[in-house]
Image (cartoon, coloured by chain):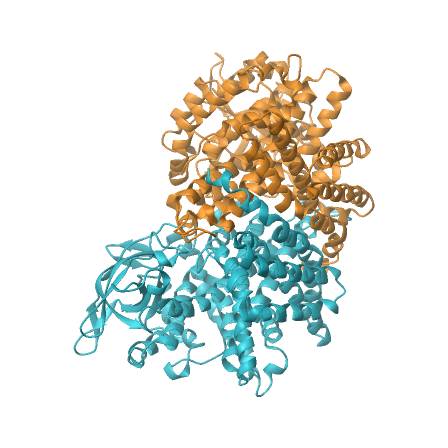
Chain colours: A cyan, B orange
Amino acid sequence: MTYRTPLQDLIFSLRLAAGREAFDAGGVHADIAGGLAEQTLEEAAKFAEGQLLPLDRIGDRVGSRFTEGAVATPPGWRDAYDQWRAGGWNAIAADPAHGGMGLPALLNAACTEIWNATNIAFALCPLLSHGGIEALESHASDALKATYLARIVSGEWTATMNLTEPQAGSDLALLRTRAERNADGSYRISGQKIFITYGEHDLANNILHLVLARLPDAPPGVKGISLFLAPKFLPDDAGAFTRRNALRCAGIEHKLGIHGSPTCTMIYEDATGFLIGEENNGLACMFTMMNNARLSVGVQGVALAERATQAALAYARERRQGRAPGASDTSAIVEHPDVARMLLTMASLTAAARAICFETAASIDRARRETDPARAMEADERAGLLTPVAKAFSTDIGNEATSLAVQVYGGMGYIEETGVAQLMRDARICAIYEGTNGIQAIDLAGRKLAMSGGAAVRREIADMRAIAAESDYAALAEAVEALAQASVFMAKAMKEAPAQGLAGATPYLRLFALARGGTLLEKGARLACRENDPNAARYETLSHFFAKNIAVAAPGLARMVMEGAASVTEARSVLVG
Amino acid sequence: MTYRTPLQDLIFSLRLAAGREAFDAGGVHADIAGGLAEQTLEEAAKFAEGQLLPLDRIGDRVGSRFTEGAVATPPGWRDAYDQWRAGGWNAIAADPAHGGMGLPALLNAACTEIWNATNIAFALCPLLSHGGIEALESHASDALKATYLARIVSGEWTATMNLTEPQAGSDLALLRTRAERNADGSYRISGQKIFITYGEHDLANNILHLVLARLPDAPPGVKGISLFLAPKFLPDDAGAFTRRNALRCAGIEHKLGIHGSPTCTMIYEDATGFLIGEENNGLACMFTMMNNARLSVGVQGVALAERATQAALAYARERRQGRAPGASDTSAIVEHPDVARMLLTMASLTAAARAICFETAASIDRARRETDPARAMEADERAGLLTPVAKAFSTDIGNEATSLAVQVYGGMGYIEETGVAQLMRDARICAIYEGTNGIQAIDLAGRKLAMSGGAAVRREIADMRAIAAESDYAALAEAVEALAQASVFMAKAMKEAPAQGLAGATPYLRLFALARGGTLLEKGARLACRENDPNAARYETLSHFFAKNIAVAAPGLARMVMEGAASVTEARSVLVG
């Protein structure tokens, strides 16, 4: 199964999201102009294709193994992680004050796609560390930063997110892990956490657990949650990290996919922890990790969709069956219109999801880097608005594209040896973790639509409208108008009849993504055409296909939101039984 | 994970498909009236829940094992198969002339759902035998029938379908397996077949391979294919089946799912075979097996969708997270509108697909049993028209529903222990085997729309229109009109611009299924209401939900067919590379 990093597409997508002027001197993304983005991605591709891709299958086959509290990652993974650190890849997005390279979220998103396309189970480890870095950078005391931050940034140590408990998944208000104050300002943490990605492993010498727990006098619910740092090894008197903390891995899960990534049950028994941020303010700190991770998980969906599309396309060009219309002999199956439809669906969904993810990343950069406070605030709202769409849509299409790859392969796709089934199994987690896609839809329909009295979504729709107005494809304008109507309905429903609003949240998010994705593809196609980009014809083809075959679902989705939601809420008695 | 056979729904669906009058004395389905259908299904449920369901997980975990040419099925399977035979379940649909019970295809479809919902990997073995029975009944010589038929009907021996070769999957014209004439009227078969379900196993003492092969003087392509019966054991001089034929299993596949079902590579080295039907007429004989199997595979999709829906509903009633709108405390997740939407999507898609499959089965019965030749011919055409829809739509929604079940379970769904991931893995094959769903769409759009100059599809649409006209849901009438328009377009395109017709075949099939499924649910809801059926409110709820949330996709699908197909055919240069 082939995978080649789509360097030209990634660079083009970066430039589309950054905007032409932003790449210029003084622009928000000036630091990656002048060839740096290109060089970085070329090096990333070389590393990922050379080191990570060859370990992807063995990761699936052997998996991580649990023995007496320890986790052995698959053969070759520790070496690859050493090279990952040595190459400086762990540090690209972190603050230079702690050894990072300070590169923009946008470039990091492109690199994240490369890591995950070649080996998602491996890439999860640094993905989690990155969330830990952001939480510490934003909320930790100077003392904690000084002790821990540089060593996560370098990759010497890794970080985890400890949120979920058996009774508390989507609903963190239910979490029970306790934290009690020690005299020295530290805390004692006790409880059980489940589904902890890379909670234990042999890639690094220390693991820093970011743990949500509840103080004895905390208010109930999510307002009584605090965030703690509980390292696997604590410093001894000499300052060496040799003292084992009272926390351990009790086992790992047998999962549908991402077998190389150990999913741990973690037990805390009066483990020493250090407060991050204020007491009872853990949810805000957690969202710092989470928002970053949500975008990265969206990028995972794009990554697997890209890899699946490449695999299916290569197979379809090779495999010969039947005669395509007009052919005089057996044709490659890519020539069969029905197979072509599957491949175009995969390719155009991937491109649309990538455009949305990169647009989100560029907005994060603008929020951080714009000197004008009003523009920074608008960019921050835009990142907030797009993040749930980037996460949910990209991971939904990750499922769709990997399943379509199995279909293009036919019987060979159902055989594990060909590797496409693994892509489908691996991809399936992405719509679930870091907030299920249903949670993303509720976040979009609720909190995000209400930002600044609806101004953020109105700005976004105005931008889509401007692109659609110049397009030859009427389906794009119809999709944007369907979104505009559904947005008005949804904002009202969430206030006046929240059950109906919530019932329409998932089709509303899909509708949003079709309108946004379709208009971004069209914007890209026009840019490529103006600039005589060598891929302009392909971008035009994908935009055309998307408008006529994917975006046309928009009016039906708007009806589901506006007319169908009532049938959900009326069905209560049938479901509750 | 729970599964209870949905007896009331099955019985109701049988009656809906049979029609009220047809259940009466003298009607086509009179033989299952008067309680026989109910009794049969109750016994089937008892057997399947008691014997097959407990073996489903061990089948997945242990799988069938290959050692030196032999295949050991999972622990307990051989006993279950013995009981299956002893219970007479293998014989229900076969001709009484050969020991069958001669029950209608409609009742067999309901039983097939039960077998596959409890253990699809087990149920595949008799599913394949059933195809073999139909091929022998329709095409074999009296001598072959006398020797073999009763022993497959009883289940003492099993049958297989040997079609696929490495270079010949969807395209049977490419097959290379050779057959040469022996002096005694038998043939010598040589070649390699792959993906042979239950090609070797330990459930029965003989395995009858139905093998497609090519005679030395056969015309090229599909007109040069003949069908042979090649038993694993041949009769010795005393008539006992002790002589090993020159055929063997060379290995079994490591698959994404259906691990209990051995998928074999079969090697024929001058194996003795007996011609079924005429020389070079193998394709017609093969389609006798295949059409039956296509409907049964559709039913497999329904079966796994039903099981997934039950599992998700049970979990959603149990699992408590967050507060639903208006709730004062933590709610069961079934109360959350977004989860309710997933469950209603699963339940209504399952009901619609079941209605289409049963309608297909009832049409097969009418084609065989109607005494009026014109009505029998119309019924035969109807079965032909609906079969690809039943196969492809049901298996597509099998994938959708099982994936949604994983989503409802959240992180627990991704863990193999809960069993829902297995349903998703098992279901994935159904859209691929017995003709991929793309092949089904092409069959519908090509051969089936053209039957009797389009009269068959016009009759079907007229029936849908009559139901939609009496419905309160405008979306149903819109779906039917969208189908009507797309059908006219498609019939014309397949003649005048086949590439465009073929490019729209998959969305056309989905559109057909939404219109047909939605109108059948509505017909059922109205029947249940008139008859004060205890489930009338639930049927009404599902019909309402389907119309407002699923059928509303129809106009968008019609646009994909009529406006989007061109964008597929124009994309050739981008895909071919």
Image-quadrant location for residue B454: top right
Q: Residue at x 20, y 78 (%)?
A: A239
Task: From the viewer's side, name the closer residue of B265 and A360.
Answer: A360
Q: Say if B166 sits above or below A378 in the image.
A: above
Task: From the viewer's side, name the closer residue of B516 and B333.
Answer: B333
Left or right placement of residue A542 versus residue B425 in this view: right
Q: Say if A222 sits above or below B509 in the image.
A: below
Q: Tell how many labels.
A: 0
Task: From the viewer's side, name the closer residue of B506 and B577.
Answer: B506
Q: Say if A419 sits above or below B490 in the image.
A: below
Left or right placement of residue A334 versus residue A98 in this view: right
In the rendered image, is residue B434 in sight?
A: no
State the image coordinates of residue B14 (x, y, percent, origin top left): 59, 25
State the image coordinates of residue B528 (x, y, percent, origin top left): 60, 28
Q: Residue furthest bottom?
A: A26
State the image coordinates of residue B41 (x, y, percent, origin top left): 50, 22
In the rendered image, is residue A423 in sight?
A: yes
Task: From the viewer's side, name the closer residue of B74 and B370.
Answer: B370
Q: Say if A288 sits above or below A331 in the image.
A: below
Image-quadrant location for residue B542: top right
Image-quadrant location for residue B150: top right
State the image coordinates of residue A435 (x, y, percent, origin top left): 45, 59
Q: Residue at x 37, y 53 (%)?
A: A62
Left or right placement of residue A176 versus residue B17 in this view: left
